[in-house]
């Protein structure tokens, strides 16, 4: 997740920032993903509120232990100065093998160094059949 992309955002840099976020999250590596956020980044993720990189790492570890075979798509919705809004979908399965597609929106605010200082996320999960999956590739079977 490229911190070299700094505000103010243009269409090109906003799209690049969103793609970098998608790539980072699809790595499912909490250490890598957490580096895109400021030391005191404030998060709302559904009904959870927390602050700081260690809390982010802890959240991501829990998330990816529960949401197996996670695969994400992000799309820029709007941007200005130091903010970007995205819509996203991701698919995952639980330990019982039930697949889900999660639909949502995020609002991001960045500091001058390009680190995300605030993340506000809302989402809904919909159970799907495995045959309905849209995001079939995983980072392990993508070619570089």
Image (tube, rainbow, N blue to C red):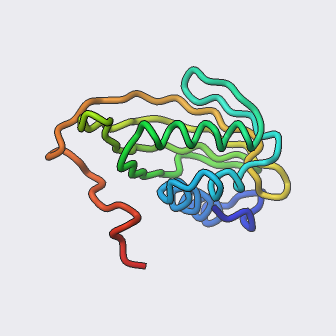
User: 103 or 31: which is nearer to us?
Assistant: 31
Question: In the image, what residue occupies the spot 59% across and 43% down?
Answer: 85
Name the residue located 76 percent from the left edge and 53 percent from the top edge.
Answer: 115
Q: Position of residue 16 (x, y in %)?
A: 59, 65
In the rendered image, residue 129, in percent from the top left (x then y), is placed at: 17, 38
Task: Find the residue positioned furthest to the left.
Answer: 131
Quadrant (top left/top right/bottom left/bottom right) for the N terminus: bottom right
36 above or below 92?
A: below
Number of marks in the image? Answer: 0
> Is 142 on the left or on the right of 118, as rendered?
left
Residue ID at (58%, 46%): 78
Q: Picture quarter containing residue 40? A: top right
Quadrant (top left/top right/bottom left/bottom right) for the C terminus:
bottom left
Whether 59 is drawn above or below 83: the answer is: above
Front residue of this view, candidates 24 and 108: 24
Side of 109 relative to 75 (left or right): right
Residue 117 position within the rendered picture, expressed as x and y whole percent measured from the top left: 77, 43
Q: Residue furthest bottom?
A: 144
Question: Residue 82: image x %, image y %?
Answer: 76, 49
Q: Nearer the viewer, residue 99 or 97?
A: 97
In the rendered image, which quarter is residue 8 located in? Answer: bottom right
Residue at the limit of the structure toward the top, as seen here: 47
Q: Is residue 138 left or right of residue 80?
A: left
Image height check: is 59 above or below 38? above
């Amino acid at each position: 997740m490229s911190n070299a992309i700094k505000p103010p955002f243009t269409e090109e840099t906003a799209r690049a920032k969103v793609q970098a976020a998608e790539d980072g999250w699809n790595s499912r590596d909490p250490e890598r993903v957490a580096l895109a956020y400021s030391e005191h980044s404030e998060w709302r993720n559904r009904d959870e509120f927390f602050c700081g990189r260690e809390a982010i790492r802890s959240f991501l570890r829990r998330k990816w232990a529960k949401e197996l075979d996670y695969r994400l798509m992000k799309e820029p919705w709007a941007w200005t100065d130091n903010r970007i809004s995205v819509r996203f979908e991701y698919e995952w399965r639980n330990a019982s093998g039930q697949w889900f597609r999660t639909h949502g929106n995020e609002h991001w605010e960045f500091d001058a160094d390009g680190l995300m200082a605030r993340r506000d996320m809302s989402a809904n999960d919909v159970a799907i059949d495995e045959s309905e999956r849209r995001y079939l590739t995983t980072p392990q079977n993508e070619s570089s």
